[in-house]
Amino acid sequence: MMFMPSCHEVQTDLTEYAEGSLPLSRKVGIWIHLLLCKVCAGFLRGMKALPGMAKRFLRPPDQAPEPAMKALSEALTALRKPG
């Protein structure tokens, strides 16, 4: 990789860049690239937003739907019956 990495090189190393685990020379090259390339900078912003979005949208509901509660109740009742 040269001092100014390509978009492919940046996107390949973006996770390590965000984690801070790249050597300084690669970090600097990616940082400069991100200043000049809106596409890669947007890719990094999107990547950094994913954990928060996942927590917000993939959390379990506050209350389980009625069919699930009924099935759980029936399963627990069946398990409690003597063999």
Image (cartoon, grey):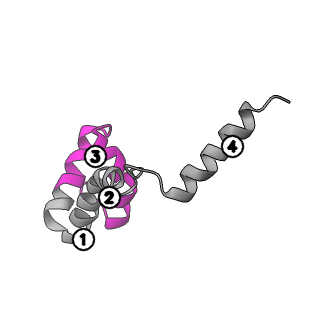
Say the numbered circle drawn on residue 39: 1
Q: Secondary structure at mark 2?
A: helix
Q: Residue at x 26, y 56 (%)?
A: 49
Q: Which residue is mark 2?
A: 10
Q: Secondary structure at mark 4?
A: helix
Q: Quadrant of the C terminus?
A: top right
- Asked whether 14 falls inside the magenta stretch, the response is yes
Which of the pair 64/39 is nearer the observer?
A: 64
From the image, give the main secondary structure of the stretch colored magenta: helix
Q: Earlier in the sequence, mark 4 or mark 3?
A: 3
Q: Residue at x 61, y 44 (%)?
A: 73
Provide residue 65's location: percent of width, then percent of height.
Answer: 48, 57
Q: Which residue is mark 4?
A: 75
Check the image and name the residue furthest to the bottom. 39
Which contiguous range is marked in magenta? 2-31
Q: CA distance from mark 4 to mark 2?
A: 51 Å
Q: CA distance from mark 3 to mark 2?
A: 11 Å
Q: Can you tell which quarter of the image residue 30 is in?
A: bottom left
The answer to whether marks 4 and 3 mark residues whose Cβ atoms lie closer than 8 Å is no
The answer to whether marks 4 and 2 mark residues whose Cβ atoms lie closer than 8 Å is no
